[in-house]
Amino acid sequence: MWYLADKAFTPTEHQLLTISMARDNLKAKLALAGKDSVPECAQVATGVYLQSLNFHSANDVHISGYIWQKVPIAPDCPLQAKAGFYFPEAVEGANELRKKYEHVQGNETLHGWIFETTVRQPFDYSKYPLDHQTVWLRILSNDFDGYSTLIPDLAAYPDTGIKSYFGLDSDIVLGDWLIDETFFDFKTATYHTNFGYQTATTELNPELHFNVVLKRKFVNAFVVNLIPMLTVAALLFAVLMTISRKRSTLAFNGFSIMSVIGTISALFFVVILSHVNTRTKFPAQSIVYIEYFYLLLYIAMILVVLCSFIFNAPVNVQRKLVMHDFMLPKLIYWPSLLLAMVVISYWALF
């Protein structure tokens, strides 16, 4: 199930693969918004090239790179397009933009900027550490009057097909992430206001997005989270194995209730520190997949402590609860623990 969840990747629908597809998609979304189609002379081709992408927190992503725009030179165009853009999801004070170049080529003017920004976006970490995330760069035109409409400059990339990735530096460092794909698309945004203009409020506004689909490196998360938990589970089983009514076994193991409580207390602090470290990564998220394993360990610790207290119960009670020298808890420990992990995994991942 881990393998299937890790490899589960379906290419995103509604990707813009060609310029003609982008224009048709824009026209359809403008029609849904009750707007007239925009002539090609007012469409500003916009491209993105990312040089760094880093998660500063669960919801803040730092991005830097290049953005360019090709503004048509068309004096007879009814809508005069203008250069300029901004990132509406940028964190205040974290946006840096520098003009790098400007050239006239043919019937258009090319403008290029170096940018650095931190954008705040919602992500779903419920399947951590087997999650896939889509980081998007939402790009809006500075021309608030609506004379300029941004479309993706797909002609600037060698391959914009399904399952391909483009617009990224080949040496980009992504840390715990791998790239599944990149793509442009138009998403519709809802604004419940007309911003003071004497026009009707539009509910569906097409906006250009550049998307990067990422997959977390499972091996890294496995080493950090699951190996310590499996080690604690093995140590809990070792503590359970020391419980016995046989004097020879007791003398060999040195069993006592206080030693069991002391050992489990130490293991509890190891687990709780690891759990808190995981929880602080996703403060706004509900319980993530890996946390259910911590809950299983807490339950296992409580049950092992209860087994140690049964040791001091009357003999007739012991015989009813744990026959054959506590053999039943020892036999079902691993099957029940692993079966619970399987059930939780199926429920959480599929």
Image (cartoon, rainbow, N blue to C red):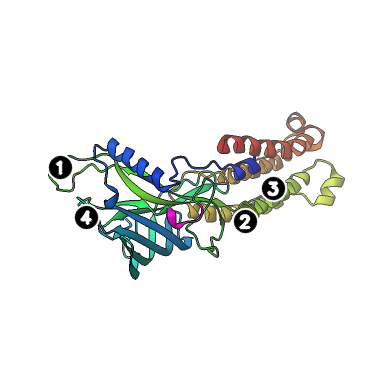
* Depth order, front residue of 62/33: 33
- Give, as a three-letter code, the residue at label 3: Ala
Instruction: Please tell me which residue is depicted at 43% across the width and 40% down the height of the picture.
Output: 14
Q: Tell me if mark 3 has few (under 14), some (14-19) or many (20+) residues whose alpha carbon lies within 10 angstroms of its own.
A: many
State which region is magenta.
155-159
Q: Check residue 270 for magenta coloring.
A: no
Q: Secondary structure at mark 2?
A: helix
Q: Quadrant of the C terminus?
A: top right
Q: Tell me if mark 1 has few (under 14), some (14-19) or many (20+) residues whose alpha carbon lies within 10 angstroms of its own.
A: few
Relative height, residue 143 to residue 23 (above, below): below
Q: Which residue is mark 2?
A: 220
- Report x, y in % for residue 277: 53, 56
Q: Tell me if mark 4 has few (under 14), some (14-19) or many (20+) residues whose alpha carbon lies within 10 angstroms of its own.
A: some
- Report x, y in % for residue 43: 30, 51
Mark-to-mark CA distance, 4 and 2: 51 Å
- Report x, y in % for residue 102: 33, 69
Nearer-N-terminus badge (3/4): 4
Q: Secondary structure at mark 4?
A: loop
Q: Check residue 158 for magenta coloring.
A: yes
Point out the frontmost of discs 3 and 2: 2
Q: Secondary structure at mark 1?
A: loop
Q: Which residue is mark 3?
A: 233
Q: Is residue 288 left or right of residue 24?
A: right
Instruction: State yes or no: discs 3 and 4 in contact (Cβ < 8 Å).
Output: no
Nearer-N-terminus badge (2/1): 1
Quadrant of residue 75 within the rendered picture? bottom left
Mark-to-mark CA distance, 3 and 4: 68 Å
